[in-house]
Image (cartoon, rainbow, N blue to C red):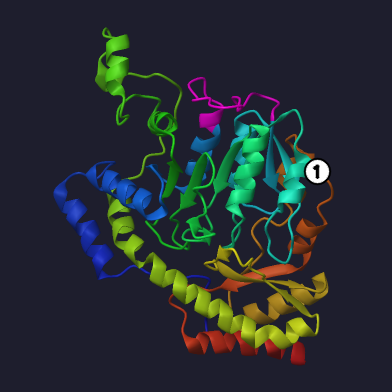
Amino acid sequence: MKIPLNKSTLSEEEYKAVIDVLDSGFLTMGSKCFEFEAEFAKYVGSKNAVFVNSGSSANLLAFFAIANPLCPIKGKKRKLMPGDEVIVPAVTWSTSVWPIIQAGAIPRFVDCDPTTLQVTPETVKAAINEKTVGICAVHILGNGLDGSAYAQIANEHGLWLIEDTCESLGVKSDNKHVGTFGDIGTYSFYFSHHITSVEGGMVVTDDDDMANLLRSLRSHGWTRHRTDTDKFTQLYPEVDPRFMFITTGFNVRPTDINAAIGLKQLPKLEGFNAHRRDISAAISAGLKPLADEGILSLIRYDAKISAAPFGYPVICSSRAIRDKLQKHLENSGIETRPIICGNMTRQPAFQHYDYLVSGDLRGADAVMDCGLYWGTHPGMTQSEVDYIVNSVRECFAK
């Protein structure tokens, strides 16, 4: 049996939606993108959603927005400046970190709890100092953080809260969507994620001024697609409003093709995630004897969190056991991966960039040295679930 990390969830609905866009003759960012933004904002409960070409681009815009001269500063927050610090998990994806560095700031890494893969409020609070400007709260592998706790920490210290939710779309904390507790939330619709637009991402915020800045940053720094373009037309009447640039920017726009797919996928998300939860629960039940023996540590979800398992992670009791399990699963046709980047500070790129660490990173080291995961995609069958459980048991029966 071959069990990949992910299988396509695209159906005839999505194919027809793509053909309709192609037949329309309008292929770039247009009405379908704006419709998807409105539907997504409604789904997660955010006032504004800005569609971009990837989750990585969503993170890029988030950090460049809080470093921008036009950043809407409210309360005790301050603009991100070169040399400032942003707290970020050591266990995360690379493009949760690169925008911090690219914006001129310094990431300060904090450890995770290896039984949940998430950082804890205590480790984040211990990392805050006079140079801290923001917290990048990453919801890892379909699990989630206690959103209210991190919002409270950020508010008490006057910090930006950026929620990287690229791996946890549809997850809730106390019945509120993660990604909507902070100033800015980011999401991904990559092919293997909870829903797909093939490539795509979303930035959400309840701040209208921030949303307009994100729209400018998305498209070259111009005023087009902002909701306040008249303001700039009146300020600069000598500049043609069709090509008016008020800040630096990128070109990270999506296409109407991506949006058409996303519009068909979004109504399926709850069903996809329910199936992921069922798969994860069945695997956990099957592997409980190994966990009870201390051979494997299974993922733990807080009672406040309504999870949507992105994959099925395990932490083995040693690196040798992890390597043995990984080899056995791959030889059995079960595709595996490391638990994202492991301890990010041990990645070769950090030979070239400044970073800081708060406390130790023993949890992140355990994830990197002893962890792996396999798929829980919504196309997985009961026979595939049984095959995975039996394969893991077989590995340790030898």
- Place of residue 394 in the rendered image (x, y in percent of width and height, measured from the top left): 70, 90
Res 333 seen here: no
Q: Quadrant of residue 283?
A: bottom right
Residue at horizontal 66 percent and vertical 36 percent from the top: 156
When the figure is inspected, residue 273 is found, relative to residue 49, above or below; the finding is below
Residue at horizontal 20 percent and vertical 52 percent from the top: 22
Q: Quadrant of residue 27?
A: top left
Residue at horizontal 37 percent and vertical 40 percent from the top: 253
Residue, disc 1: 358
Graded by Cα atoms within 10 Å as few (under 14), some (14 to 19) or many (20 or more), the crowding at tag 1 reads: some
Q: Quadrant of residue 362?
A: bottom right
Quarter of the figure that contains the C terminus: bottom right
- Place of residue 373 in the rendered image (x, y in percent of width and height, measured from the top left): 63, 70
- Place of residue 84 in the rendered image (x, y in percent of width and height, measured from the top left): 69, 28
Identify which amino acid the numbered label 1 is placed on: Ser
Magenta span dominant secondary structure = loop
Look at the image and say whether residue 82 sits in the magenta stretch: yes
Residue 343 left/right relative to 181: right
When the figure is inspected, residue 108 is found, relative to residue 222, above or below; the finding is below
When the figure is inspected, residue 230 is found, relative to residue 9, above or below; the finding is above
- Which residues, given as a range, are shown in magenta? 64-84
Look at the image and say whether residue 117 sits in the magenta stretch: no
Res 210 seen here: yes
SS at mark 1 in the image:
loop
Residue 203 left/right relative to 325: left
Residue 326 left/right relative to 47: right
- Place of residue 50 in the rendered image (x, y in percent of width and height, measured from the top left): 38, 41
Q: Nearer the viewer, residue 181 or 283?
A: 181
Q: Which residue lies most toward the left here?
A: 24
